[in-house]
Image (cartoon, rainbow, N blue to C red):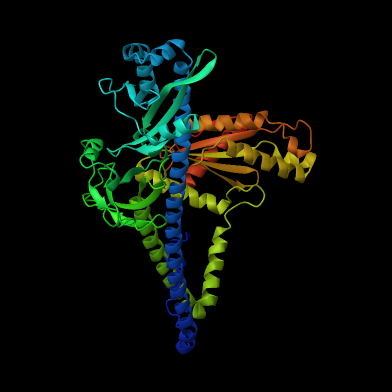
Amino acid sequence: MKFGDAKYRSSELHSGATIKSPKIKWAILAPFLGLIVFVVALFIYIFHLVQKEDLEFEASRTRNSILYLYQNGIENHADILAVSMNAFVDDGRFKDAMTRKDRERLMELTHGQYSKLAKKFGITHWCYIDTNRINVLRMEQPEQFGDKVNSHTLLQSGQSGKPFYGVEVDDRGIFYLRYDYPWRADVNGVSVLIGYIETGIRMDHLFDEIEKILGVDISVVLDKSKLKDGHWLEGLGANAGKAVRAPFRPDVQSLFKRSLGLGLAVEDMVSNESLWEMVSSDTDAEGKKYWVVPVSLDGVKRKDLGYVLAFLDVTDNLTSARNNLTLIVAISIVFGLVIFWLFYRLLAKTELHLLDADRKLRLLATCDGLTGLLNHREIQCKLCEEIERSARYEKHFSLLMIDVDHFKKVNDTYGHQAGDVVLKRISKLVGDQCRAIDWVGRYGGEEIAVGLPETALGEGVLVAERIRRSIENDEFKESGIERIKVTVSVGVSEFPSCDKTSAGLIRCSDQALYQAKNDGRNRVVAADHC
């Protein structure tokens, strides 16, 4: 009888049971129910705190990463600019042209190299400046010259007499990494300043790299009061953002420098440098959620050039957290109610549940103690189930009956312990030749039954032959006797061609097995249509 049968359903077995002493039960169960509610509420609160800490940790990690990448990027780009400049400052042709302020010659010498550097490293400008800080030649805009250059890096380089670099924002609101090199030449054995070379890279390039590395959208907020009216519009370009008042600096009109296309309401979304605030996308129909992480940008001239705003899309995180919380709450409530119900019933049903569990445990005893294979009773159950399934789906099913040849002689010659070892070894060899869907059982004594679902008679014979050969070729070293020779005879029957009942299939397999014995043993015989 299977567990699913009505006979073994505990609700039907004990339908007549009654719960006694309800006052005592509720006196016990009421605090227990309160404890369940408290634990569920506490778990929800802890889960909320953990989720919030995870988001704040991610925001903090992003802020630190941006700072590191920003500072490290400045150093790396400054190294690129310095290396790029070496090919020019040591070349006598460039020095001679610069000394004479020969713009045409400088253009001729520089054009090819500058184009390569611009393409390879993203260098945006290259400027030759005389000792009076007058622009001699701008490679990116050669038609503009003669103006005075007052960049902070150039002033610092002139004062120190050494290369100087730093981040600046021009009056158009464009971030630049500038590198100024004081260019000197030997004149009659004396080192004389002949001018400066100023190179630079737009910081949009660095911000793009930070975006790619971190996988987040970032934007830059600048102080618009430091920019020239109208000029900052040129720096914004076609996809410019809009002027906003920065909440972290209420006295400063700021400029939303890099447009993200997120449709975010920038107004009042940042409280200060150390706090993060949730904002929603105004234009996104799906209601995207973002953590805004403000990071202060320091420049060479001032400590608060602007802010990088990193937009962490936490929509999936929040949705996942909300779904997980809903699922956990539901599971907790269901689990609590189940525990409550079980505890309620337990007071009156303990003995009956134990008896029911004992009956189920007895049904679990389906394996043979020696070989670990299915026992005789379970073989009969499996056989009936497989016949029913094969009949329903019109499938073939093969049954193998395997018997050890002269097994009594093994016991008489080597002892029953050696015989037990042989049976265990044969059981393993048989199992090794079977599929996961096949089943193997000890039918009785030295006889083993093998069920092969969805296997026709011819295929069953092939499997039986593989089993026979594997046993014949094994030396049974585990038996403690060297080179013991054991063979088996196998009878094969098939559903439905041989018979359509379990007893009939067993009979057909046995008849084929007897035929194999009579024909000389150590062979496989397929049953005729019984």
Q: How many marks?
A: 0
Q: Decide if residue 200 is on the left or right side of residue 374.
A: left
What is the x, y in percent for residue 129?
A: 37, 24
User: Relative to 446, does residue 464 appear above or below in the rendering?
Assistant: above
What is the x, y in percent for residue 346?
A: 50, 77
* Residue 516 visible to an observer of this rendering: yes
- Image quarter of the C terminus: top left
* Residue 456 visible to an observer of this rendering: no
Q: Nearer the viewer, residue 503 or 176?
A: 176
What is the x, y in percent for residue 31?
A: 48, 82
Q: Residue at x 44, y 17 (%)?
A: 88
User: Relative to 34, does residue 493 appear above or below in the rendering?
Assistant: above
User: Relative to 525, does residue 314 appear above or below in the rendering?
Assistant: below
Q: Residue at x 56, y 67 (%)?
A: 358
User: Relative to 276, does residue 446 appear above or below in the rendering?
Assistant: above
The image quarter in which residue 448 lies: top right
The image quarter in which residue 128 lies: top left
Q: Decide if residue 338 is on the left or right side of residue 464.
A: left
Q: Residue at x 36, y 16 (%)?
A: 101
Q: Nearer the viewer, residue 155 or 71?
A: 155
Q: Residue at x 36, y 24 (%)?
A: 127
